[in-house]
Image (tube, rainbow, N blue to C red):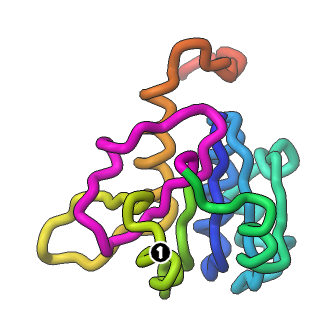
Amino acid sequence: MINIVLVEPQIPPNTGTIGRLCVNLGATLHLVKPLGFDIDDKAVKRAGLDYWSQLDLVVWESFADFLATHPIDDRTHLATTKTDRLYWDADFQRGDYLLFGSETRGLDERVLLEHPDRCLTIPMGSGGRSLNLGVSVGLVAYEALRQNYEGFEKITIPNKEVK
């Protein structure tokens, strides 16, 4: 469906949660090193639950390596707090790349300045600086799904008896 790219993520549970989200969306998760944790970290797998083994995962040695294969173009969206362009105003298509920076630094500001037309943000009140990475990815990824829902292959979960 789409590609979620985490550039130098630092917090294992965020990555695990995003991995679980990717499985449910049929999205590919790209992790760009250096990572702030070991990919086999218990916290990653705990947050990803039993979904981690089903994850379509690609690990990149560096952001330069990722960009050499997937240069920023009109199918790339850069999540940042440093723009006024709202994420729901973006035109998402199947196969797009949604890039998110680390929890502590975000995406490299030079990249954002080189591609201001590819930047998007999530509106927030004046009392906060940013949202949790997992929440941010979820909001933007599900807007991409909303725009491309027709033909989306739903994942069925066996009915469980409710007690």
Rendered view: 102 above or below 30: below
Question: Start and end of the magenta stretch?
Answer: 74-97
Considering the image in quadrants, where does the C terminus appear?
top right
Rendered view: 148 above or below 82: above
How far across and down, in percent of the image, does residue 152 sit?
Answer: 61, 19
Q: Is residue 85 magenta?
A: yes
How far across and down, in percent of the image, does residue 119 sit?
Answer: 40, 62
* Apparent side of residue 128 relative to residue 155 in the rendered image (left or right): left
Q: Quadrant of residue 101?
A: bottom right
How far across and down, in percent of the image, does residue 45 sit?
Answer: 77, 62
Quick one: SS at disc 1? helix
Is residue 57 something one can see in this rendering?
Answer: yes
Q: Residue at x 51, y 25 (%)?
A: 148
Q: Is residue 1 magenta?
A: no
Q: Residue at x 45, y 84 (%)?
A: 109
Is residue 103 something one can see in this rendering?
Answer: no
Q: How many marks?
A: 1
Rendered view: 145 above or below 51: above
Q: What residue is shown with label 1?
A: 114
Judge the density around disc 1: few (<14), some (14-19), many (≥20) Cα neighbours within 10 Å.
Answer: few
How far across and down, in percent of the image, does residue 141 sit?
Answer: 50, 44
Q: Residue at x 41, y 48 (%)?
A: 139
